Image (tube, grey):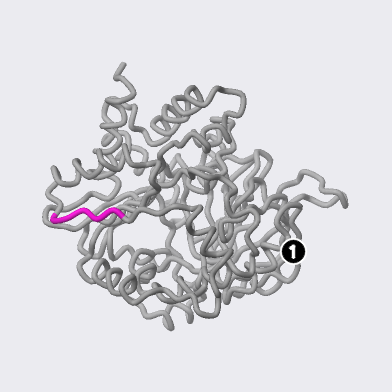
Amino acid sequence: MPSLAELQQRYAELLIRTGINLQPGQGLLIRAELGHAELVRLAIAAAYDAGASYVHVDWFDEPSVRAMLQHANMEKLQVPNFDITRHRQFADEKWARLSIVGSEFPGVFGDVDPQRMRTWAVRRAKSLKFYTDAMMANQIQWCVAAVPTPAWAQQIYPDKPVDDAVETLWHTVLHLARADHNDPVAAWRQHSMQLTQIATFMHKNQVRSLHFVDPTPGPDGKPATDLVIGLAERPRWVGGAAQTPAGVEFHPNMPTEEIFCTPHNQQTEGYVCTSRPTFPMQREVDGAWFRFEKGQVVDFHARVGQDVLAQFFEIEGARRLGEVSLVDISSPVFQSGLLFHEILFDENAACHIAFGESYPECIEGGDTLTREELSALGANTSDTHVDFMIGTPTMCVTGRCHDGREVPIMDSGRFVAAIFED
């Protein structure tokens, strides 16, 4: 059995060689917290071994951001030109991007005014929209992965001493990212093929809408969830590896267990309850409920974070969906039995919806269309994109096809066997 240090080395190489699939002569941007430094150094070495032209690390510190949000004059606070200019270079020169998550300071933004957080989030999003658009259109390779920190580890394993918690979380992260396999690259190739098989079923049957029903009775005796999501025109289901226009294959998330598509921004009806907490504008929202009419949220409530949701839905386009994702409860992330308090993992434990911006790749030929053309097909546009988990072990999903047929897709949180029989 390899040592933890050997597995971490393998993980760093996996992120560079398979996660972003760095090409010789390509630049690399790494975004990470200071507590991720040890793994970042391994990734830098692996990147130069892979032929990187240059590696730039964009270090950030959450308490520093908190200080800014609490004390800055919000009317004068602007994204500086140098930050915009360097992101233009990253986009124009097609630098790959590796984002490391795993908070050093969970909950650090808990006492920050949500309105101030929204103001800054929208201002920064608008200033760097060209860059996020390039990422969401897969014009550059990008990958999000995790590194354990002491505070995050104890949030997940509160009963363990801190060193034990960190080591346990490391092994969990490495396992879920398939870095502990004898051949991690082959394991990812096989996993990607399985996800593609599910997407192929959706395309073959020309599924045009999804009906989510969780029959578990809510407080009013009705099913906990009863939601119909129509898909944008020319829908394309995506799962596993992504590809740049130049044909470079990469994996945007490590781990990933989802297949996803673009909802039509006028065709969501019904109501849905969340099944895990999420963090719009870096503030917790839990126990949320949403009701939709004609694609838009018209009523909502959250047990935790009602004020955060109120501010979040003030963002243009945030009341409509940009993504619907299917995740089987056989997912190793769900089977771990853990609540990670980190969207990279929690979204891969459960079916989810995302409010805000949609992915062009989820529309056939979407990577060649303008924003106006995408919008005409039903794709949503926004300055945000936030996932909310809705999947449960009792969730059932039915697809309505282009010819009017209905096909079962999930039963009790699992994909039906017929999907894998074709």
Q: What's the residue at 37%, 49% (across, down)?
A: 32
* Residue 415 image position (x, y, % from top left): 54, 42
Which residue lies at the image location 57% right of the left edge and 77% below the top edge?
316
Residue at 35%, 64% in the rendered image: 135
Q: Position of residue 67 (x, y in %)?
A: 53, 60
Which amino acid, mark 1?
Phe
Please state if 69 lies on the left or on the right of 215 as rendered.
left
Asked whether residue 260 is in view, the answer is yes
**Highlighted range, magenta:** 53-57
Q: Main secondary structure of the magenta part?
A: strand
Is 127 contained in the magenta span?
no
Crowdedness of circle 1 by 10 Å Cα count: few (<14), some, many (20+)?
Answer: some
Q: Looking at the picture, tell me which residue is in the foreground, 29 or 263.
A: 29
In the rendered image, the quadrant that contains the N terminus is top left
Mark 1: which secondary structure? strand
Taking the image as shown, residue 227 lies to the left or right of residue 382, namely: right
Q: Where does the image place residue 401, in percent across and percent down from the top left?
A: 55, 61
Q: Quadrant of residue 112?
A: bottom right
Question: Residue 398 appears at what percent x and percent y?
Answer: 62, 53
Foreground pick, 334 / 8: 8
Q: Is residue 196 visible?
A: no
Extreme right residue here?
A: 220
Decide: is 291 above or below 347: below
Mark 1 — residue? 300
Name the quadrant containing residue 87: bottom left
